Amino acid sequence: MAGFQDWTLAVKNLLLPQYCRQCGVRLLTEENNFFCPTCWEMSPAIERPFCTGCGRPHPAMVGLGTRSNFPCANCRDKPNRYIRRTYGAMRYDGAVEEAIKLFKFNGRERLAGPLGALLVDFARREMECGDYDLLVPVPLHKVRQRARGYNQSEWLAREGLAAFPGARLDTSLARIRPTRTQSRLHGKARQSNVRGAFAVSGDSVAGRRILLVDDVVTSGGTVTECARALIRAGAASVDVLAVALATPPDVSLEE
Ligand SMILES: [Zn+2]
Ligand SMILES: [Zn+2]
C-alpha cells in the first residue's frame, strides 16, 4: 500500500508541484505540504533557561550552562495579575510563523497535526502536565469564526489534550464583542481593544486549574483579558500555552 501511495504522490507532485513556503525548494513528498523538513527543523524552539512568568527565553544565558528557569526583570517587577505562567514552544519566527499564518486561513487539516505536535512535545518536556483540569482555547468572535469556519486555537487545544491526560476541553469562554487585530494597534490601544471582550458562560471553570491555549502570544493583552474573565468566573488558576511567543513581546499579529 505504501508503494501505491508513493506512486500517487509522485504523480501528484508532477502535476501539481508544491514548494516550501519558507525557502521555495520544491517538495518531493507530501511532508506537511507547506514546508521542507529543513525549514521545519530550523524553526527556533524555546529552550531553557526561559522566564517563569512570560515564558520568553533568556538569550544571554545560552552557553553559560544555566538550565534553571527564572523570571525576567519585567515579570519580576510586574507579575501578571491573572496569569500564573505563560509557556511557548517556539519563537514566532521562520517556518512556524508562516505555518501559524497559514493555519488561520486555509491550513487547518494539514497544519493542526504538526503545530499541535510542537505543543505536545514542549508540554511533555517542560510542564507539569497533571496540573490542569481544563484546556480552554482563546475564542474568536462568532462572526469571525463563522467566516473562518473554525477556531484555530480550539484545534490546537484538541491536539494538545494528548499531553494532558487528566484534562478535558472546555469552550465556555467566549469573545462577546468583535475586536480589531492587535497587530494594527499599539500600547494602550491594545488593552482597550480587548478590554471586556470576553465572558464565561456557566460554571464549569469554577475551582478549576485552567490552561488557556492560543496559537501565538505577542503583547499578551488578549490572553490576559481572557484570564481575567476566567478568574472572575472562579477559576482556581490560569496558565497559558502557545505554539509561539513573539520575542520581543510587542510585535506583529495577535487575533
Ligand atoms: Zn524550506
Ligand atoms: Zn518574563
Image: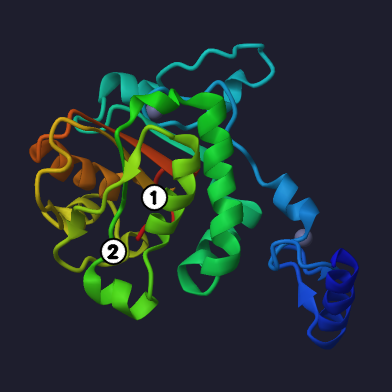
- Kindly identify the amino acid type of the residue bearing the numbered disc 1: Asp
**Quarter of the picture holding the N terminus:** bottom right
Quadrant field for ligand 1: bottom right
82 left or right of 58 in image = left
Which residue has dot 2 on it? 140
Label 1 element class: strand
Kind of element beneath mark 2: loop
Amino acid on which the number 2 mark rests in the picture: Leu
Q: Earlier in the sequence, mark 2 or mark 1?
A: 2
Residue in the foreground of this view, choosing between 192 and 108: 108
Q: Position of residue 235 (x, y in %)?
A: 16, 34
Q: Are marks 2 and 1 in contact (CB under 8 Å)?
A: no
At which x and y percent is residue 234?
Answer: 10, 35
Marker disc for residue 240: none
Residue 253: tell me if it is visible.
Answer: no
With respect to residue 144, does 59 lie above or below?
A: above
**Quarter of the rendering containing residue 31:** bottom right
Q: Residue at x 28, y 45 (%)?
A: 223
Could you tell me which residue is drawn at 24 percent across and 76 percent down?
A: 143
Residue holding disc 1: 214
Q: Residue at x 38, y 56 (%)?
A: 154
> At x 59% / y 22%, what residue is drawn?
60
Query: In whole angstroms, how far apart are the C-alphas of marks 2 and 1?
Result: 11 Å
- Please tell me whether residue 180 is drawn above or below residue 203 in the rendered image: below
Q: Is residue 153 left or right of residue 50?
A: left
Residue 73 picture quarter: top left
